[in-house]
Image (tube, rainbow, N blue to C red):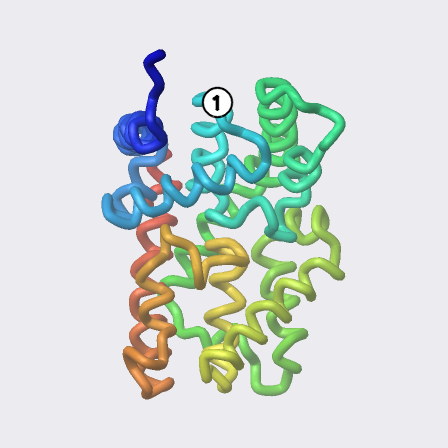
Amino acid sequence: MWTIRQEQTEAFRQHHLQKFEDEMVEHLKKFSPKQWKLVGEPDGRRAIRFGIGQARGYGLTDRGPVRFYIELMFMFGSYFDTDPQHPWAATALRNTRVHDQITRADQLFAAVNEYFLKVVKPERDHLIAALLAFSRVQIEDYLPSTTNRDEAMLQCVRSTCPLRFEYLGEHVVRKLIRHGTELARAVGFNGDNGVALLVILTFVAGHGFSEDPQYWWISQMLDSQRQPDAGRRYRDLSSRSMLYLEEIAAGRCED
């Protein structure tokens, strides 16, 4: 009796994964051209492979649901599924009562569509203006010397993204600020400017930005082994982040 050996099965699986990855590359170039250009193909492919694994962890293995999952990664960050900014994602993905993949993907689509209608779309123009303004000034301008740092960051988020602030609530916003602050401390960014930079990146690029394959340049710039001088790392990251924010804002203006 003829049988398929394990290595043949694995080779067959890898062939189809590679084909899907290639298809996703072409799809993302059209679906999110600005983000794809900023990410670049090597990191983009790394993100696609990461997304395939993440989707599988939620029981999503069919082509359509996996593609949708990766699309959401490029919209909200590769760790959108655990980001406190997107509670709708965790609710839909962890709904163990629904086993059919298409049904779960439909629920996820409905959740993200509601989020767009409630927060993203009405806040869009204001957020673009805020991103453009932020990219053209010094971070120090967001931290008045007479104001507590955490409270200054809280007010920055409240004024920049009022609907998102209302949607998330002060407790979640403070949690995200703490996340950025703790990350800053871990990488040696102890000054107000370094903390502010990582807090803002937490909101703009998602709470997992420091490990996100789409933002590989961030993880490299934060790596103390590559550059022991924390001040130099901050300056390099700040400069690159300003360029990134300008590109994101320009891309949203063109959409």
Q: Amino acid at mark 1?
A: Asp
Q: Position of residue 195 (x, y in %)?
A: 51, 76
Residue drawn at x 37%, y 53% is: 213
Residue at x-position 45% and y-position 74%: 139
Q: Quadrant of the C terminus?
A: top left
Quarter holding the N terminus is top left
The part of the image, by quadrant, that contains residue 37 is: top left
Q: Quadrant of residue 207?
A: bottom right
Q: Is residue 44 visible?
A: yes
The outermost residue toward the top is 1
Is any part of residue 27 visible from this angle? no
- Secondary element type, mark 1: loop
User: Within 10 Å of the Cα at label 1, are there few (<14), some (14-19), or many (20+) other Cα atoms?
Assistant: few
Give x and y (percent) for residue 106: 61, 21
**Image position of 73 (left or right of 1):** right
Q: Residue at x 46, y 71 (%)?
A: 197
Which residue is disc 1 drawn over?
Answer: 62
Tally of numbered discs: 1
Q: Residue at x 71, y 24 (%)?
A: 98
